[in-house]
Image (cartoon, helix red, strand yellow):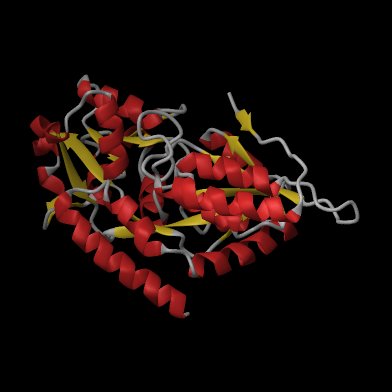
Amino acid sequence: MTRHRSQSCVKTGPSKLERLRSSALAHAHGWRVLATLILLSCLVSPAWAQPKETLIWLLRDLPPTMILEGPKKGQGIIDQMLPLLIAGMPQYQHALMRVNRARGMQMLHETSFTCDPSLVWTKEREQWITFSIPAFRAVSNGLVVRQEDRAVLEPFLVDGEVDLAAMLASGRKKVGVVAERSYGQFLDTLLKQALPDALTRHYGDDALGSLLQMQRLGRLQVVLGYWPEIRYKANQAQIADDQLEFYPVKGMGKYLSGHIGCSNTPQGRKAINEINQLLRTMPHDRLDQQYADWLDPERRSDYLKETKAFFEHQAEQ
């Protein structure tokens, strides 16, 4: 069920607003920062001022970008980035709405003033969503099997990467995927070309967790997904890291970009222009480190090096 999260608006003078904003940014953390900034964005302007438009942010539990429940609540990279975006857009009131994947996509199709802070760009989505420049970098999707099932991938391994197109065409093993999720343009194309019985699609708010449970029970051998998210979900299900093996997909590249997407309306396009200005001055070094903390130690230094170069080049454009 979709749940709404909102903050009440209160009245205060300009000096108090400045003190509250400074205090929130200096001392609060995570969702406490976010809640405080939303409260500040709702503060009533002088009577002669025009009412502010409300920008609705769509939130989904998608570790390690957004974590809405559990012991690591509020520690995702978007959890840390969103307060900075809200602080930089005082011209709007900001409302948070927790949604599932289907509801979020439906709202972006509508004419509401709605933005999702964690989307993968695809050509198809660009027809009805206006996208920001890259907001963060993530490790690309790959295939995960249990240690005892590694042999099922061996016929399709090329220099340590899985030839997913050949695997799907062979029809030997089904691949578990989250229904209606985009895995990026490259993988989405492969999945669309696959025969229906080559995939096991799972719906629901915790589709990935359900696929991992099916894998643990031996009902499914191969799951497609982000390794940091899989590790997080596996840990919740008491599945140890050393029980699983992650393989990159041939042709994918190591990393892909996450974007902010807004409904493709005049309001949404205006907001994306403003968001792009903020993203160019975002403290990416700090945010990238927070994402890197979710990676295997041997991958962290490579991720930080490549991501630093990526965002330095973006800032120069």
Q: Is residue 78 above or below residue 235?
A: below
Near-viewer residue (111 or 285):
285
Q: Position of residue 267 (x, y in %)?
A: 73, 57
Q: Position of residue 129 (x, y in %)?
A: 60, 54
Location of residue 252 by image quarter: bottom left
Figure quadrant of the N terminus: top right
Location of residue 42 by image quarter: top right
Among all residues in the image, which is located at the extreme bottom?
316
Left or right: residue 42 versus residue 240 is: right
Left or right: residue 182 versus residue 161 is: right
Q: Taking the image as drawn, is residue 201 in sight?
A: no
Near-viewer residue (232 or 201):
232
Q: How many marks?
A: 0
Q: Taking the image as drawn, is residue 38 in sight?
A: yes
Q: Position of residue 143 (x, y in %)?
A: 24, 43
Q: Is residue 111 above or below residue 212?
A: below
Q: Is residue 273 above or below residue 2?
A: below
For the point 45% across and 35% down, the residue is 61
For the point 13% across and 50% down, the residue is 157
For the point 11% across and 58% down, the residue is 159
For the point 38% across and 56% down, the residue is 287
Near-viewer residue (278 or 180):
278
Left or right: residue 169 versus residue 52 is: left
